Image (cartoon, rainbow, N blue to C red):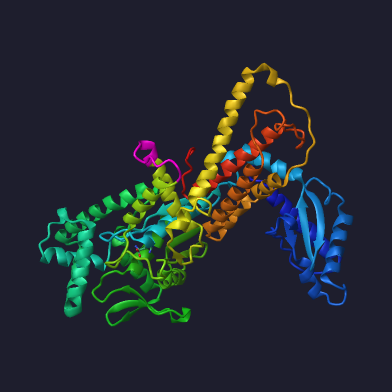
Amino acid sequence: MDINKFVADIIKDQLTKAVQEALQELGIEATVVLEHPTEGTHGDYSTNVAMMGFKKVPGEWKSPMELAEEIVGTIKDKDTDKEGGELVDKIEVAAPGFINFWLTPNALLKELDHAQKAGDAYGAGKPDKTMVIDYSAPNIAKPFGIGHLRSTIIGQAIYNLYKFLGWKTIGDNHLGDWGTQFGTLLYQITTKKLDVNRLTIADLEGEYVEFNKMAVENPDLKEEARAWFKKLEDGDPESREIWEKLKEISLAEFNRIYKLLNVEIDYAYGESFYQNMFEQVIQGCVDKGIAMEDQGALIVDLSKNGMPPALIRKSDGASTYLTRDLATVKFRIEKWDPDAMVYETSSEQDLHFRQLFAIVELLGWSSSIQFLHVKHGLYLSPRGKKFSTRRGDTVHLEDVLKEAVERAGKLGKDKDTDTERGGELAKEVGIGAVKYFDLSHHPATNIVFEWEKMFALEGNSAPYLQYTYARTRSVSEKARGLKRDKDKDKKADRPLDSFNIPLNSEELAVLRHFYKFPVVIREAAENFSPNILANFLFELAQKYNSFYNKHRILSDNKTTAKSKAVDGRRESVVEFRLEITQVTGNILRTGLGLLGIQTPERM
Ligand code: ARG
């Protein structure tokens, strides 16, 4: 079996084609769009093409309903196998002109088997293209902020999604380890004769604040800081040594956070890596005739693109954030020859990336590469203010993560976080809750930071999904236990009767959700919207739990373990329901895994 062929694709192609052919026969030109209706009573697929087509050919039909009937009639005439066939159970017309399609239980069951056999590879793609993903990117000598947390979480989810779909994904943590901020610190450290070896990130933050206060009264200080950065850029050994130390202090802290987040990024070249390439890049702009002098500085005029000019070299000769990004693009193209380059940062950097992409295009580097800036919004405090780590009254990322782990430890009955396992579990649930909370929103939205929602056991939260996963695992485990007992008990060994009871609506609801998983993953990736996957998983968990609450899955009591005709291959209700349980568990594990969220076996 080809694991890359999903019922969802086959059916969509076939239905689209059938509808298109019917339209052609009726002389109507319209694009067929098939959608999954939100209401289960409207079938598995639905199209409004009759409403669209009706407008295009006025007078031919009395109403969109009539046209819809005609289309359906044509489909049925042409291909008797479409309805009542292997894949399509029935086709119906619904007011004011929708055409709804139902899949056969058999098609759903086939996909169930497919999902079961494919296991964790269900929905995966084949090796294909290369993507560089630039994410996380905290700044050296500054605290790891909430914005960098968002970038880390969203960037990693995008990385995972594309990797799963077969892309060669390369993660690059573009650390902010170069730039004028080092001038500020060099000034503070050298004039105050501070011992770098004893400085913490909090101290460094204090030095910025102090410097900025002083600079308000004495603007010349900014010049001093710039001069220090220039010295660093020119290779001054003293500056260099201090800078190395600052980097070391910061990386130690960042790595602690990455470990807590369970994130590893393939590369971390950082801005400083490109020091020796600036001149070449700047020269490239000059040679192309796109750079011009402006009061001693060098700029690229982007007025034709409706943007302010981009500064690529300061008047003192120092590089800028943009120059470093240009060098980075060049380096990545030479090293990895990617098909796509994706950046995940706050939407505040929108102009920066638009300028970067415009210059890359002017330089003619980008003809076959897709450049994309995935922007994230802000975290807001419940009072609607920006939730930031910069100001004195604000929250630090590490405190947030620590609180999340603590809250997770207090969830449910098991408050025992002191044991090693309890601590590990609290971490998986707490960090999972933070990640899921973020990823269940579209990246571009501003999110109100609400602990209650993050940990809502009955809501759209990681703990709810993790509980559901653990539930599927405990059911399967119990089944294995029962089977062992049964094997010992010879009497229970007799074959189960053959059966013929239709699927109940809760079983159907789960089956009708499963087959969408491969499509949802692709949609989430193509739209750079992990929230599409998150919400799919939430719905799956809800559907599974309704099924679980209403029906017995396992029973040592032979009357409930009645045999049932599903499709002749499954021997009993128990076996069938276990398969549903297992596939639910697999999809939750795979899906949450793609979101970077761990799935403890027990909770
Ligand atoms: N360090 C930057 C910041 O914190 C983000 C870097 C994003 N990546 C890039 N290639 N510019 O704002």
Quarter location, residue 303: bottom left
Q: Tell me which residue sits at (67%, 41%) in the image.
A: 112
Residue range corresponding to the magenta coloring: 412-423
Question: How many numbered circles are shown?
Answer: 0
Return the residue found at the far right.
77
Placement of the N terminus among the 4 image quadrants: top right
Query: Left or right of 18: which side holds 575?
Result: left
Percent coordinates x, y for residue 187 in the rendering: 16, 67
For the point 45% across and 42% down, which residue is it? 413
Q: Please tell me which residue is depicted at 25% across the width and 72% down the height of the picture.
A: 317
Image quadrant in which you'd find residue 76? bottom right
State the residue in front, 472 or 254. Answer: 472
Q: At which x and y percent is residue 5?
A: 67, 46
Residue 561 visible in rendering: yes
The one nearer the camera, 516 or 23, is 516
**Quarter of image, ligand 1:** bottom left
Whether the magenta-drawn stretch holds residue 418 is answered as: yes
In the displayed structure, 368 sits above or below 493; it is below
Q: Is residue 131 visible?
A: no
Q: Main secondary structure of the magenta part?
A: loop
Q: Position of residue 417 (x, y in %)?
A: 37, 41
Q: Left or right: 86 with respect to 508? A: right
| Vertical relation: 271 (above or below) 255 | below
User: Observer-nearest residue: 495 or 16?
Assistant: 495
> Which residue: 50% across, 61% down?
441
Q: Is residue 89 magenta?
A: no
The answer to which of 359 and 472 lies nearer the viewer is 472
| Left or right: 449, with 283 as reference point | right
Drawn side of residue 92 relative to residue 447, left or right? right
